[in-house]
Each structure stands twice: as structure tokens, then as C-alpha cells.
Image: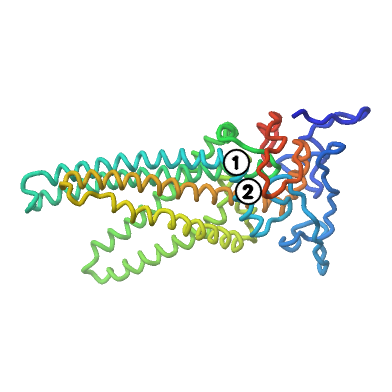
Amino acid sequence: MSTPQPPEGSEPSNPYVGSPNPYGSPNPYGVIPSQPSQPGGYQVPPYQPVGAYPGSYSGQQPGHHPGQQPVFVQASRPGTIPLRPLTLSDLLEGIFATLRRNPGAVLGISAVAAVAQAAVYMVGIYALFSTLGENMMTPGMDDPSDEQIFDLLATMATWGGTSFGGMMVLSVFFTLLAQAVLGIVAVRSAVGVKTTFGQTLRLMRGSWGKLLLFMLLLAVITTVIMAIFVGLIVWAVFSWQDASFGVAIVTILLFGFATFMIGIWLGIKFCLTTTLIGVEQIGPLRAMGRSWRLTGGAWWRTFGIVLLVTLILGIVTSVITTPLSMISVMFLDENASAEEMVQQTALLTAIQTGVSIFVSMFAQCLISILYGLFYVDYRMRREGFDRELLNIATSVGAETDDRFSTRLNAQTLDSAADDLVPGRPRS
């Protein structure tokens, strides 16, 4: 689709360069583009902030005065969400609207993450059950000695711990990657631009190193916390006959509780960090500080919505995976030998685990989209991001979206929008 040309006699306008931020303060994340003239196209309504947005915090929008009643206006919807501060229903609808518009990107990330995690886990499980099968066929296992029992437990701990640990490392990696990548998808969808799986990886150029640096920072923090926890456990073990044993146990409980509560609080305050790394391509420390500011005054709202969505997706995941684990038992051959029984159990466990990992990762991808919508929401509330999104939607030729439409928007066929990431600083 070609970009509409300005009328004769007028200066050609760059859709990404225009007037400064209408709120009066410089915007380091990109200037507000001026509205191009597009007869018959998607028209941006005049922006008149005469009152507080519905659901916004007092004093955060220009034009709000004490005692003034909020003005409810019809919001533009060029993409998956209305361009105004979002309600709970807007966020929930926006998650599935983004999935509907970008199935390749969302399912692609889910599939890659699930395959990588399942491969590591299946290798470990196969090695574990194969070793168990061989040990069970060893002579003397009907009445095993202490040494044989120790070897068997050591084998189970080695392979089980290796497979589980490897899967957990990959899970954290792909969870953070999904938040960064799907944040880009959510922001592009807000202006009606579709994103393919290949585009998501290409648009992450410039963010990979920053994302890995943030993962390294999390690994260091986690290692320090675990080292303290292990040290407290060692203290309790060596003092179990001393008077300090009770103090050690109380210290462990208090440390665990404090770590858990502080972790939840900081997790919400920094929940937009990876989204900011992906969208705005800023460093991890700067992204953490920016996430802290964007979520300021909205901790309970963010926590409540994340908890609600997590519970809903957790219930759906359990509904899918629980019957699978119950049905898999029916495929075991009761007349099989011990070695064959171990092999069958290993195969069924691998299949069941693979499906569970994919479903869980898909649910995590939906939560990652939620974080992307939070990013758009809080920037609209605090930085007038809706104005920039409206002008960008105009520049790419978006039309008002039917919330249940399955059509392709015109701009999805326009290569000019291939590298567009609203909110990303433009050089």
C-alpha cells in the first residue's frame, strides 16, 4: 500500500517528525508526529484534554482541576485496544485480540520455548529411566545393599537435578525473551500493525545484549540470595544441639518470608523492565528505573490484574494437563516386564511433560502480552502516549478496528511499517 501524498503546495511531511510533546515537556522517547492530511483516511480526532481520563489517577492528565468532573469521550481504536487509559476489560480483551492478530508470533515463541525446554527435560528423563532400568536388572537388586541403594539415589538425583535445572534455566530465559518480544508485538498491534514471527526476532536487534545483561544481573542476585539461604541452613544443621538452633530456624523463616514478600513487591515494580528493553532498546538499569516510575502509584492495580490473569490461565492449564496425566496411566501395559514398564513410563512422562511445557509457555506468552499492554497503558496515563499512537496509526493508514474482525489491515501489507516500533526512540 502506498503512503498518501500531501496536497499540492504543502510541504511533504515526515510521519515520524512533527510537533513537540503537547504536554509541554520534552519527550526523550520520540517527538509527537504531526497529523498528516489524509482526505478520506483515518482521521485523528482533535486532542482536547479537558478532563481526566476515565480510570486515570488524579492530576496525571493535563487540564484536570480539583472538583472538575471527568469527561468521557469516544476513544479511537485503530488496533487491538482503544487509545485511552485501559480498564480491566480492555486489558483482557487486548490480550486475546493481540493473539488473534499475531498468531504466528505468539505461537512461534511458545513453540520454540516449549521445544527447547522439553528437549532438555526429555533427555534427562530418558537417561534417568534408562539408568534405573539397567540398575533394576542388576543381580541382587531384589535385596539391594546400602551401596546399591546409594548409587541408585545418586543416579536419580544427578539426572533428575540436571534435567530439571536445565529446564528451569531455559524457562527463565524464554520467559524474559517472551516479555521483550511480545511487548513489541503488543505495541505494534495497538496501532493496527501485524507482526510475524520472523519480524519479532528482527525487531529485537539491538536488544539482545541488553536482555542477556539483565538475565546475568538476575542470576547474580539469585545466586547471592541462595548463598545466604544455604548458609543459614548450614548454620541450623551445625547448631541443632545448641541453644542457637531455635534462633537459626527463626532466622531462616523470617529470611524466607521477607525474601518472598520483597520479591513480589519488586517483581511488580520492575515488571516492565524486559518490555522496555525490547521496545525502547535501553539498558537494564535504565529500564528498571523507568519501570519503577511508570508503575508508580499503580502497584496494587498491576498486582491485582497480574494475579487475576495468572489464576485464570493456571486454571485453564490445569484443566488441560490434569486429564492428560490421568489418561496416560491407561496406556501402561500391566503384563510388561520391569524393564519394559520403565521404558513405557519414560515415554509417557516425556510426552506428558512436553505438552505441559507447551501449554504453560503459551500461558506465559499471554501474560507477556499483558505486560506489553501495561506499558502502553501507563505511558498513555503519564506521557500522553495515546497522541503519538494516534498519529502513527494515521501515518500507516490504519482504520477503526472492529474488535472481532479477522480481516487483514491494509498496513499489514505495507513494507513501510515493517520496522515500526511505537515508543522506540528514533535516531
Indicate the amino acid at tag 1.
Asn
Q: Nearer the viewer, residue 274 or 228?
A: 274
- Residue 54 position, x and y percent, is 74, 61
Residue 382 relative to residue 63: left or right:
left
User: Residue at 65% across / 43% down in the picture?
Assistant: 406
Name the residue that disc number 2 marks.
97
Name of the residue lying farthest toward the right: 9
In the rendered view of the protein, which quadrant contains the N terminus?
A: top right
Residue 204 relative to residue 417: left or right:
left
**Residue 4 vertical position relative to residue 152 in the rendered view, above or below:** above
Contact check, label 2 and label 1, Cβ < 8 Å: no
Q: State the separation of the CA atoms marked 2 and 1.
A: 9 Å
- Residue 162 position, x and y percent, is 30, 44
Indicate the amino acid at tag 2.
Ala
Mark 1 Cα-neighbour bin, 10 Å: few <14, some 14–19, many ≥20: many
Name the residue that disc number 1 marks.
102
